Amino acid sequence: MTIMISYLFLQHYWWIIISLLAGLLVFLMFVQGGQSLIFSLPKNDIQKSMIVNAMGRKWEFTFTTLVTFGGAFFASFPLFYATSFGGAYWLWIAILLCFMIQAIAYEYRSKPANVFGKRTFDIFLFFNGSFGPFLIGIAVATFFTGSSFSLNNFNQVKWATPWNGLEALLNIRNLILGFAVLLLARVNGLLYILNTIENAEILKRCERRVIFNSIFFLIFFLFFIISLLVAEGFAADPSSGIIKMEKFKYLHNFIHMPVVLILFLTGVINVLYGIGISVFKNSKKGIWFTGPGTVMSVFSLFLVAGFGDTAFYPSSFDLQSSLTIRNASSSFFTLKTMTYVSFIVPFIFAYIWYAWKAINNKKITEDELRGDGHMY
Amino acid sequence: MIENVDLSLVDWSRAQFALTAIYHWLFVPLTLGLSFIVAIMETIYVQKGKEEWKRITKFWMTLFGINFAIGIATGIILEFEFGTNWSNYSWFVGDIFGTPLAIEGILAFFLESTFIAVMFFGWNKVSRRFHLVSTWLVAIGASLSALWILVANAWMQNPVGMTFNPETARNEMIDFWAVLFNPVAIDKFLHTVSSGFLLASMFVLGISCWFLIKKREKQLATQSILIASIFGLLSSLMVVYTGDSSARTISDVQPVKFAAFEAHYQGKDNAGLVAAGVLKNSGEMIGEKNIKNFVFKIEIPGFLSIITTGNKNGFVPGIIDLVKGNRDKKILSFDEKKERGIYARDVLMDYKKARTDNDSGKIEVIKAMFSDTQFQDNYFRYFGYAFLDSPEDMIPNVPVAFYSFHIMVLLGFLFILIFSLALFFLFRGTLVRNKWFLWIALFSIPLTYVASEAGWILAEVGRQPWIIQDLMPVSAGVSKISSGSVMTTFILFAILFTVLLIAEISIMIKQIKTGPENQEDKNQ
């Protein structure tokens, strides 16, 4: 049986995969959110140890998702990889540095003779936890606000500012999304701790912080969403590929893709519900709602950025250099090959789920930490 | 693509990538090999059920974890540097190169990261068998990850399975299996992975010998030595075998690199293999580069011809033949290749002009040219030569290639001897008495790192000036950012990598000195 698959279909399919990975990545940044609290949340060393270990058993998932996100983006939309990484150099280097220091911090923090002391590695964790989500939020915001670059005839990038990506930090909308992602990671981190750790004092301190972080998250998130809906967007003419500014473009995308709108609203409602039951009912299951809610919301925001003939990586400097899922993608053959590979993904989810459950079957307590043989 | 590029930018970008790769490669081979050694030890534990084997397994597993973490830290930088520092390259080949990188993430990294959590935290939570399977999956995941990144690297050394699309100005994949089963990829994977096994075996052997010197942990040490010596001996034989076939493939697909690591300038029949030698400037020049000759050399007559052509009288081209051409042997000169490369580039420029002028007739004619195999084989395959200025630009740094190759090979044979002696003394029961050997085994650990890094230096310096063999020189692949920016990040990375390495070595030494007793308890 031969199924005819169009190039356009594969481009859309791969944008869905990228969007899904982005959603998962933002959810999994609950690890970073937890890390950003390690100096303020615990009252003593053992409490800190419990929090670090709760996060430390999951950090590799976040890290691997980030690396896979990069690899999949490279394979499916190489022009984005070449343009953004090679152009917004300093922004990406800053993100990489944040994640690089995380990779050793868990393993080395409590090992004897670690030269720089536990506190240094805890600062690394805090740094990664705070700046990682914030900077990723900034980078993602440029998908909607645009960057300053141009491409020549051979698709080679030239960045229009000498700041090579750092100028994104001066855009208020970018900053708002950066803070929103950081605060969401913190809320998810707190809800994950509520769900995983059994220690009355930690839980009590968590509850207060959930309220505080949630309020600020909602303020920043609402600001960003409203500014997105009323903003001009980068629309691509499907036949000529010419990019034009269109008023209310992202609002139009939501309206023209009701499934995405429903998905987005379901995601937001889930996040709100998760926060709500944690705050008002003292439930520890909040993460089970905010987690999927985060994935759905981010997933649908990415779909709005790339679908509906929209430039997903727009250039505010040279409109016609903007990247769309059509002009930035790999060839038909490569996308098709990668699509076969993507069929393995459900199997990967299955074994991650299985392994995760197998080692998460006990709540983290002081005794559990000591009895396990490996401790961060 | 046609613009001049600031050479200091190219140099800093190369330096940064080299720095990251060299640091990354300090940790990866140990991860590759130690994961299998730990898996073998745990298998014995599960089969025999003796707690002593669990203790041994956990000791080496702790060292594995320390090393693994820093490998990840340097690895993420390496992956993204293709984009940050080599963005023109990333576009030119992203259609092919990105695929193995993505598959590496999807297939290998998730396998590793999922089951490493079970490996470290699952001892009291999952069954013995599930734990054992997890340990094996981590080992397999590590090697799978090596497979895909080496497939990507091999494609740069020998680009296959693609065609150039003038519309997008990039190479596009047309045959995935050709990319995966690229002969360079197969050689490179087997050679690299087995060299990692070798390094890890020496690591285990050397540290175990140190315990014997200190008269501590005799049982752990001898049992570890047994496994490390057998695994190490088999691996080192594999390294020799795959190294030989690797050299043969290189002589075919990268003849200049091959000639450079043998410092073979003048092509000849019945060419001898230089087993060891010292180079000096001869005074003769190719352009601005001095031709080297030997202060002294130990040569095996006819052997170079045999390993490359299978025949003692086979002709092995030298650097001079490859630069100046050799009509009898049908080798094109640099000038001829450059002329063809310029022609291919001009055709591409014509295409872009036709596109701007909307000249559909011309567009179709040129498109047809690019899909014509004659044009591809005779012109486009020399595309990269259009970017080179003078003949000597196609010659890599010969002394670096020559010495790194010979250091690697000589050390490789030394390691076979060390593993064989370890087994010999072990079976005769005289290991502890031969203290000199225990010290040699301990001091051989850094030598395996030297050999391993030398291999990569040879592979990467030897292929210069190409980022993609014959298609794109490094100067054309670099991201156009200020050299000051790259210099700054180079310094930043150099400091950070070094700081982390110091912490890693210090922790590792402390853990080894502590030994397996109450290792985890002492962590607090």
Image (tube, helix red, strand yellow):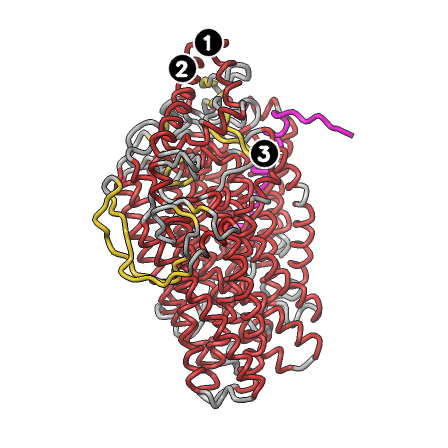
Asked whether A60 or B376 is in front, the reply is: B376
Magenta stretch mostly in which secondary structure?
helix
Looking at the rendered structure, the number of numbered marks drawn on it comes to 3
Callout 1 environment at 10 Å: few (<14), some (14 to 19), or many (20+)? few
Q: Which mark is residue B359?
A: 1
Q: Position of residue B138 (x, y in %)?
A: 60, 61
Q: Position of residue A172 (x, y in %)?
A: 37, 34
Tag 2 secondary structure: helix
Q: Which kind of residue does numbered mark 3 sit on?
A: Thr
Q: Are marks 2 and 1 in contact (CB under 8 Å)?
A: yes
Give the magenta range. Answer: A1-30
Q: Which mark is residue A334?
A: 3
Note whether A144 is above or below B289 in the view shown.
above
Q: Chain of mark 2?
A: B
Q: Which kind of residue does numbered mark 2 sit on?
A: Lys
Q: Which kind of residue does numbered mark 1 sit on?
A: Asp
Mark 2–mark 1 Cα distance, whole angstroms, equals 8 Å
Residue A117 highlighted magenta (yes or no): no
Tag 1 secondary structure: loop
Q: Which mark is residue B353?
A: 2
Residue at image coords 68%, 62%: A358
Q: Chain of mark 1?
A: B
